[in-house]
Amino acid sequence: MVSSGNDRSCYWWNQRNRELAELGAYVYTCSRNETELNECLQQWTTKGFQVSGSVCDMASSAQRKDLITKVSSIFNGKLNILVNNVGTNIMKHTLEYTEDDFSFFVKTNLESAYHITQLAHPLLKASQAASIVFISSTAGVVAIDIGSIYSATKGAINQLTKNLACEWAKDNIRTNCVAPGIIKTPLAESHLEDGKLLEKYLRRTPLGRLGEVKEVSSMVAFLCLPAASYITGQTICVDGGFTVFGL
């Protein structure tokens, strides 16, 4: 399987890859941060997992092509699982965003996932039973009052999931999406330091707490297993009920 990452911390990215590696997957992963990548690879290999990876900035078209070339060589032209986990966020109100902000979000959050999936298609088709999992966000499912460009890119990922599920079913490729709510990671906690956003979120969350990283990674792993073989085109929210809360 291939797992891509850019701005996610090792805290999140590590757990998702570990979950799949523990189930016996050979994981090839990437990050644009070489130090972080090497630290994670060392952790996994010490535990006996089958894992390797390389430095790749997923916002670069040339580096995406180079990544798939490496992956094709390692997996002999076949790929069973592709997990698209690239994403970043800058919290601003709509009138504060610039044209450069817009381009940055689209290139990082949408274009990278779209293009790497196109490039991976021949490998996924060759496996004859492949699974693609996108990582989206609840911000792409319901409206929030800040971060409109981020929300738009995540909404686009949700729709891409549906389109590919229909278009590529003939190639025995399933496509699903996991949309987390606010999960306990250093990145999320930095946005919640003033307490107001956290309080507002918890009021709207029936389970009344933040999510744990493992609660997301377990859903990703499930969607890659034969047990999920009749599930495709779905965006599954792992959010403690945030997206279904009513007044």
Image (spheres, rainbow, N blue to C red):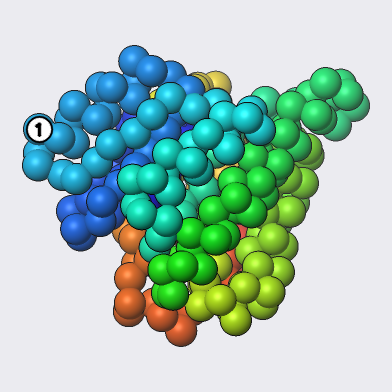
Q: Disc 1 on helix, strand or loop?
A: helix
Residue drawn 43% across the image and 19% down it: 33
Residue drawn 64% across the image and 40% down it: 112
Q: Where in the figure is residue 245, as x and y percent of width and height?
A: 60, 63
- Which one is nearer the viewer's eye here, 83 or 11? 83
Mark 1: few/some/many CA within 10 Å (<14, 14-19, 20+): few
| Mark 1 lies on residue | 46
- Which one is nearer the viewer's eye here, 67 or 43? 67
Q: Residue furthest bottom?
A: 230
- Residue 239: tell me if it is visible: no
Decide if residue 22 is on the left or right side of residue 138: left
Residue drawn 39% across the image and 77% down it: 228
Q: Where in the figure is residue 52, as x and y percent of width and height?
A: 28, 36
Q: Residue 222 falls in which quadrant of the image?
A: bottom left
Q: How many labels does the image show?
A: 1
- Residue 27: tell me if it is visible: yes
Q: Where in the figure is residue 237, as x and y percent of width and height?
A: 53, 61
- Which one is nearer the viewer's eye here, 20 or 129? 129
Q: Where in the figure is residue 39, as x and y percent of width and height?
A: 25, 22
Type of residue at label 1?
A: Thr
Q: Residue 194 falls in which quadrant of the image?
A: top right
Decide if residue 245 is on the left or right side of residue 101: left
Decide if residue 167 is on the left or right side of residue 37: right
On screen, residue 179 above or below 125: above
Q: In what quadrant of the picture does the C terminus appear?
A: bottom right
On screen, residue 159 above or below 99: below
Q: Residue 146 falls in which quadrant of the image?
A: top right
